[in-house]
Amino acid sequence: MSHIVIFGSARNQGRTREAVDHVFKNHDFRFVDLKDLKIAHFDYHEENQNDDFIPLMEELVTYDTIVLASPVYWYAISSYLKIFIDRWSELLSSRKDLARKLERKRLFVICSFATDFPLGCASFESPIRQTCNYMNITYGGCYYKHPDTTYVRSLGFPDLEQFQAKLFDKNADLDLRIHGPRIQLRLAMMSDRETLYQWIYHSDASLETVQKSFQEFKTNWNPYYFQMPLTGRGHVFIIEYETQAIGAIAFHRPDPKGRSEMDIWLGSEKFCGKGFASETLDLLCRFLYRELGIAFFWLQPSARNLHSIHASEKAQFRKLPLMACEGKNEFGLQDHPDSVYLLRDMSVGCSVEA
């Protein structure tokens, strides 16, 4: 499998180059430094662009895997890479042959940053992920190089070994995954709906008193909850521990006040009380705050569900002084006669109890 690295940094021997060499240790790759090329800004009239862009793209499409490398500059990719990706628009009009050859290519990102990651703004990865979705390129994820590896893991980013496992295995599953200290979250697929239904209504951890048929369940959960691309409409994620699916968590479209409801289910009572739920809640809150800018999350477990309430509070959700009927008036929903309402405000801190 062949790899080409498109490198965009003001320094060719800085932290980003160090990250590239770290990832590709003992692996061959083609290295292209955009600083050495003449690539003009995108021009709607495609004038005066007899530069190095098209020759580079003609070479790039001969590789199996594309890797973009950039520092985090003011919360985004470098200007070198931005100009390069802007020029992809040209392919969609004048060079559709090259645009078609990009389809189903694998694309990864390597970046470096030295300070705290800018939570709460549009993610560094988001524009690249959405570009890949639009161009029908398979996005494999990003490796974040930072001096504190524990801090990187706390943000849900893959470690070096997890990133390399995807980058160098052509058969690797490239579904969106969020990495935690013990668990991983992967975007649920349509094939997961039957399992989710069983967890909600028929597992020994379920507290549901009103049974619904699978058809009713499917009616209540739109297909977009189980499909890419990631959007703010809502999604379900499967919780995995040691490659075993142990539960699920969902977030819903934020209300007019910017508050997104969450639901979490564990597949069995044996997984309760082990800290999986609190880690999952914290991990997804961090990811959605970083990726979609959602700052407020709320839950409404039954007062009987002591495991859920404890896990929520451990993940920095604050119990609101609302009766169930008052919570319904405030949030518009009441799932249980004894619903307890909890809220997390991401702007007041992002740490979680170990």
Image (cartoon, rainbow, N blue to C red):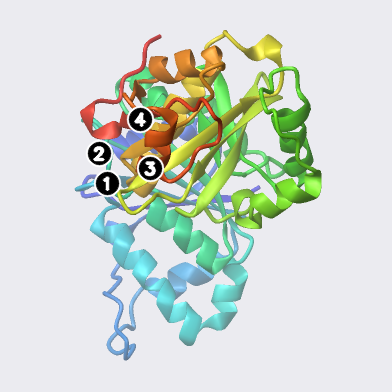
Determine contact: label 2, label 1, CB under 8 Å. yes
Label 3: state its secondary structure: helix
How many marks the image carries: the answer is: 4
Determine the CA span between mark 4 and mark 2: 22 Å
| Sequence order check, earlier mark of 2 and 3 | 2
Q: Amino acid at mark 3?
A: Asn
Q: Which mark is residue 329?
A: 3
The quarter holding residue 305 reads top right
The residue singled out by tag 1 in the image is 121
Determine the CA span between mark 4 and mark 1: 20 Å
The residue singled out by tag 2 in the image is 118
| Sequence order check, earlier mark of 4 and 2 | 2
| Sequence order check, earlier mark of 4 and 1 | 1
Determine the CA span between mark 1 and mark 3: 30 Å
Using a 10 Å C-alpha cutoff, classify the residue at mark 2 as few (fewer than 14 neighbours), some (14 to 19) or many (20 or more). some
Determine contact: label 3, label 4, CB under 8 Å. no
